[in-house]
Image: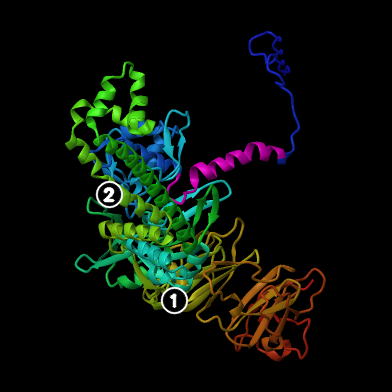
Amino acid sequence: MPKPRKKPAPAPDAPGSNAHIPGAGEIVRQPVTETVEHNFMPYAMSVILSRAIPEIDGFKPSQRKVLYTMYKMGLLTGPRSKSANIVGRTMQLNPHGEGAIYDVMVLMSRGHERLLHPYVDSKGNFGKVYSRDMMYAASRYTEARLDAMAAELFKDIDKDTVDFADNYDSTMKEPKLLPVRFPSVLVNLNSGIAVGMASSIASFNLSEICKTTIALARDPGHVIIDTLPAPDFMGGGQILYARAQFEEIYESGRGTFRMRSKYTYDKSNNCIDVYEIPPTTTAEAIIDKVLERAKAGTIKEISDIRDETDRTGLKITIDLKRGVDPDKLMARLFKLTTLEDSFSCNFNVLINGSPRVLGVRALLNEWIIFRTNCIKRCVSFDLNKAKERLHLLEGLAKILLDIDKAIRTIRETDEESEVVPNLMIAFGIDQVQAEYVAEIRLRHLNREYILKRTADIEQLIKDIAEMEGILGSERKIKNIMIKEIEDIVKAHGKPRRSEIIYAEELPEAVTEQEIEDYPVTLFLTREGYFKKITPASLRMNDQHKCKDGDAVVQVVEAGNACDLLFFTNKCQVYKSGAGEFEDTKASALGDFVAAKLEMDEGESVAYMAVTRDYSGYMLFAFDNGKVAKVELSAYATKTNRKKLIRAYSDKSPLAAALQLGADGDCVLGASSGRVLLFHTGAIAPKTTKDTQGVAVMTLRKNHRVVDLHAYVEGELKTPARYRTKNLPAAGVIATPEEKGMVQVGLEV
């Protein structure tokens, strides 16, 4: 086959050549540390500072840009506007594409039902936070305006309360922070994933967080948890309360707490209606998990589950089988599905441009500092405006002394540029005052107009003195902040939505299904097929159906609530319950255990043990003549592990296994035809599952153990002949009459 030709390199001046690009095509070695420093770190800092982590006002940059755009569009009091229009206008501040902007607006909307106090009053389909598949409509179909709560975000924003910065192309100004009048950083749910860090802030009830802020402003040593018991979420649900757990979260800003769904039982329809779920899951995720558990056989009390969410709200309906206790079932579902889920707190907030993980106390203290600074700047702005106004009115008051002189001075001035200087000289006022007087319209140059304007001088003097007093007193500034917060609580406060329940008072949930116990007979075939048959069914037909070459090798009379241990040829044991297998008939092949228990490839069942309390022993006879005696309790586990490795020793191939309830006589058979009768009490029991055991039967070269079973009275005509005082022993050649009773080989 001819080799492919190499494509000739383009000429230096040909199209596609990189000759005109300096350094093009060169391989430059660069240390990894330098690459990270120059390429990765700027990206990481941009994501942390400008995208993913909220600031002290409670907003990420993208959220702040959307809200400020809507405010400048007059959507605080006006009619709703098409969402597409809002998105388009926001791109003047946030050039990241309309999809990203619309996503941000949806999450802040009332219709999405994510925030306790939404900032966007929406109309149309904005999706639901509790639904994974319920998508929101396109922006051209929906409408929005700012919600009433948003008025508390922008009050006094035009009074220099916060700093402004240029937008991305320096054509507009946008606020770096919003002068929020309440601790919004802890009122609404907020989360973000940056580079190397993340933020997850739980929402709290507005009334509780405001009362806590007021108490903390008055007393820095206030116990936070006394007025702020736990978070609160728009979706409601129940919070499993543990005081120490929340104290740790409030102190460190990190921690996890559990939440569970709320439900009611409809007796007439025998169904459970779930109507509130944790904020970390969705209705579809819950349904998928319940169906998964039902298919696996873990949950058998449910006949159907469906999503009946409609315009009235969330509703997951679970149809129950007859006789099922709904409370016990829900207790199990809480443990097995996301009907109970955890919420992880990570109060990571940007403070003066630096990400910091703060507890509730520290975070509220930072917000108090931020808000008092906003109030100071607002009062300073008003003070400067009042002083400017007073200065102008003082100049106007001097005109009051002689209006005719002012008119004559202006009329007798030859040039327009000399009007202001002449007024300054005539009345002893400065340029600013003279400019103000000169701009007064002729119709206003009367005593009534001037008296009305100068009547405010006395009030302005009082106001200036009061504002200067406020700026000189931290206590007065805090009182203003407290009064604002109290007004917000009166206007927007709502009762808690998430119910608090005490975790220690909840009953212990039984995660395992309550299995009905009744007599059954268990059968295991050589090829690994398992049958569980009731006595009634067995009486009707006891002729077993098996594959060609297969046969039943174990028969055990037991109960449906027994545990089964399937020891395999790969030194592993798989645990199951008899109740996890369906009742069958002798005429059926049964369940193939390897497939049912998802065994490894090439793995097959070697022995089945049946137990209720894990008492007794397991005997393992190996090819080399050793026997291991392992306590059955070694296979009992506190967790629901279905597979245990190193179930027995792998130093020599397993010849046979035997379950014993108590010590007794057992028979070993070898391929040489020898038989040994011994008492298991001579072997010390071990708790180590993969013990190699002790030598019991000595074997000649090329021979091995082939059988181990419990001795049955009368099985051997002369049992003393096969018994020995000391172990190990070689055993005795079985007589022709007794060879049929024991699985042995031929003497070599």
Residue drawn at x 25%, y 45% is 456
Label 1 to label 2: alpha-carbon separation: 89 Å
Q: Position of residue 66 (x, y in %)?
A: 37, 39
Query: Would you identify the image quadrant in which residue 575 lies?
Result: bottom right
Query: Would you identify the image quadrant in which residue 744 lies?
Result: bottom right
What residue range appears in magenta? 34-60
Q: Is residue 233 in sight in this rendering?
A: no
Residue 6 lies in magenta, yes or no? no
Which residue has dot 1 on it? 561
Q: Amino acid at mark 1?
A: Ala
Q: Is residue 506 in sight in this rendering?
A: yes
Q: Nearer the viewer, residue 161 or 254?
A: 161
For this view, does 202 lie left or right of residue 664? left
Residue drawn at x 20%, y 40% is 452
Q: Nearer the viewer, residue 384 or 95?
A: 384
Which residue has dot 2 on it? 459
Q: Residues within 10 Å of mark 1 (few under 14, many from 20)?
A: some
> Which circle marks residue 289 in the picture?
none
Q: Nearer the viewer, residue 699 or 427?
A: 427
- Closer to the N terminus: mark 1 or mark 2? 2
Q: Amino acid at mark 2?
A: Gln
